[in-house]
Amino acid sequence: MKDKTIDYALRATWQAVAKMYNEEAGKFDSTMATGFTLLSIDPEKGSPSTALGPKMGMEGTSLSRTLKSMEEKGLIKRKPNPEDGRGVLICLTPFGKEKREVSKEAVLTFNETVKKHVSQNDLDSFFKVAEVINELISEKKIYK
């Protein structure tokens, strides 16, 4: 295809963002997936393991691998969920909270840098388009 398609622009941009985040995370002996997971866990109460996958849009096996690696690095610990005897809470360790702040700073830096180069009107349009795309997909209005 000669002309850029919407999905091409989304894919190419996301791949560039993911590469950028992975390069930055590598400076801290981490990965984008680990950083994203750290940001998705409630830093005070922890998060049910079953809620993390859907919240992050991650498959169970990928999330399991990421959590196992995070546990081995001392970023998280698993605790029984007091509200659900069968469930597990994923809780950040003090080291995990420290690394969460590093991840948070990376995301905020990215957002602030983009905001300096894109008008608020263009950002609003971008978020509106993203919202419409997500609605079309979730309501199965593209492929029936």
Image: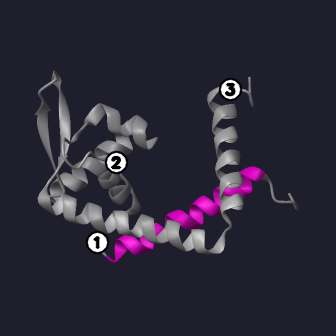
Of the two numbered discs 3 and 1 in the rendering, the one whose residue sits closer to the viewer: 3
Residue ID for mark 3 = 140
Residue lying farthest front? Answer: 120
Position of 18 relative to 59 (above/below): below
**Label 3's element?**
loop
Name the mark on residue 40.
2
What residue range appears in magenta? 6-27
Question: Is 26 in the magenta?
Answer: yes
Q: Nearer the viewer, mark 2 or mark 1?
A: 2
Are dots 2 and 1 in contact, CB under 8 Å? no
Q: Residue at x 46, y 41 (%)?
A: 57
Residue type for callout 3: Lys
> Going by the image, does 39 lie left or right of 125?
left
- Near-viewer residue (22 or 123): 123
Q: Residue at x 86, y 57 (%)?
A: 1
Seen at 25% across and 65% down, the residue is 99
Magenta stretch: helix, strand or loop mostly: helix
Whole-number angstrom distance, CA of label 2 to CA of label 1: 19 Å
In the image shown, does 66 or 134 lie closer to the viewer? 134
Crowd around label 2: few <14 · some 14–19 · many ≥20 (10 Å): some
Q: Which of the 4 image quarters holds residue 115?
A: bottom right
Q: Is residue 85 above or below residue 70?
A: above
Q: Label 1 belongs to which residue?
A: 29
Q: Amino acid at mark 2?
A: Ser
